[in-house]
Image: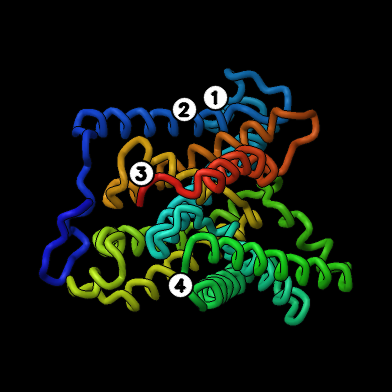
Amino acid sequence: MTQVSVQTPTPSSPGPAPGRRGPLTRASAVLGLTALLALLLLGGFFVGSGDISLDQAWNALWGTGDPTDVIIIRDDRVPRTLLCAVVGAALGVAGAVMQGLTRNPLADPGILGVNAGAYFAMVVGSVAFGVSAGGYTWWAMAGAFAAAVLVYFVGSRGPGGASPAKLVLTGVAVAAMLSGLAFALTMIHPSTFDQIRGLLIGTLDGRGWTELSLAWIPVVVGLVVAVALVGYLNALALGDDRASALGVPVTAVRAVGFVAVTLLCGAATAAVGPITFVGLMVPHAVRMVLGPDNRWVIPMSMVTGPIVLVGSDLIARVATPSELPVGMVTAFLGAPLLIWLARKDRGSPL
């Protein structure tokens, strides 16, 4: 599967062989995905509620035309679409990192309870300490990290270690427990429910420059850390024993990886609420096109994640007269994939 240096690996160490995927195929895929993302971003600027033609939207994008149109485009659609892209990149890369760290093709921040942990921490912060939207990010990160550690610790106990099935079952149980507790707290404290109900399933309605300004810095830091881990993730694909024999500090790599997932999922959940299945769909789509080498999977998940989430948001805007939460659309798209993977008992090779 791979040629990993017998010396202490570095992030540039060779990963899994590309197989039949040549440079031309990969270059075409990268260019195609990048072009698709650019088109979807433009679509996000021009598609939405309000009777605004393309010409009017284009003029409003540059600050000319009707003042109402300018407000709708520049203060609503543009920041919403950019935030959607940032969150999509965060969730896509978080899923790829989690799948690499656990060697579990079913790993996903939503399925493994990470997003539920972030949301639960936000509710606790609001109920116990009066935290408002501006302070959700740090609470969400703490909750995401605690949930990730809890799921991995519990799921790795007993015979067989951290098998994919055990981790998924543990993650589903932890997510259900934390979601139930969060719902109970919001029922007991109606003011918290009114404040946080828009984040119950993941929505971009009403999100703007404030949420984007709070989310982008931790997301960028998390993406940088994830990229720095690509060589080590390729080594971990060989198994912990082989990776350790090759000089990989397995425990340290997993700890740093969980920090990256915490930053990415915490910031994303604080901004738009818990969104499931993006972290599951994106890495599998990238691997099917570009192969299992994390030197390609991680960077291209930064492009494919926004494609999935921006596309889902566009569907959410136009699917019904009253806008759907984007989390419903991603669940509708991702649930069949999870069922297929579970029936196959495998995913794209790691």
What's the colour scheme? Answer: rainbow
Crowd class of label 2 (few under 14; some 14 to 19; many from 20; radius 10 Å): few
Residue holding disc 2: 39
Q: Where residue 300 is drawn, which disc sits there?
A: 3
Front-lying residue, 217 or 336:
336
Residue under circle 1? 58
**First in residue order: circle 2 vs circle 4:** 2
The amino acid sitting under disc 1 is: Trp
Q: Quick one: SS at disc 3?
A: helix
Residue 161: numbered disc = 4
Alpha-carbon distance for marks 4 and 1?
Answer: 55 Å
Please provide percent x and percent y for residue 76. Answer: 64, 41
**Residue drawn at the location 70% of the way across and 28% of the way down:** 318
Query: Number of numbered discs present?
Result: 4
Mark 4 secondary-structure assignment? loop
Earlier along the polypeptide chain: callout 4 or callout 1? 1
Question: Mark 2: which amino acid?
Answer: Leu
Q: Earlier in the sequence, mark 2 or mark 1?
A: 2
Which marked residue is nearer to the observer: mark 2 or mark 3? 3
Numbered badge on residue 264: none
CA distance separating discs 2 and 3: 17 Å
Q: Position of residue 1 (x, y in %)?
A: 22, 51
The amino acid type, in three-letter code, at marker 3 is Met
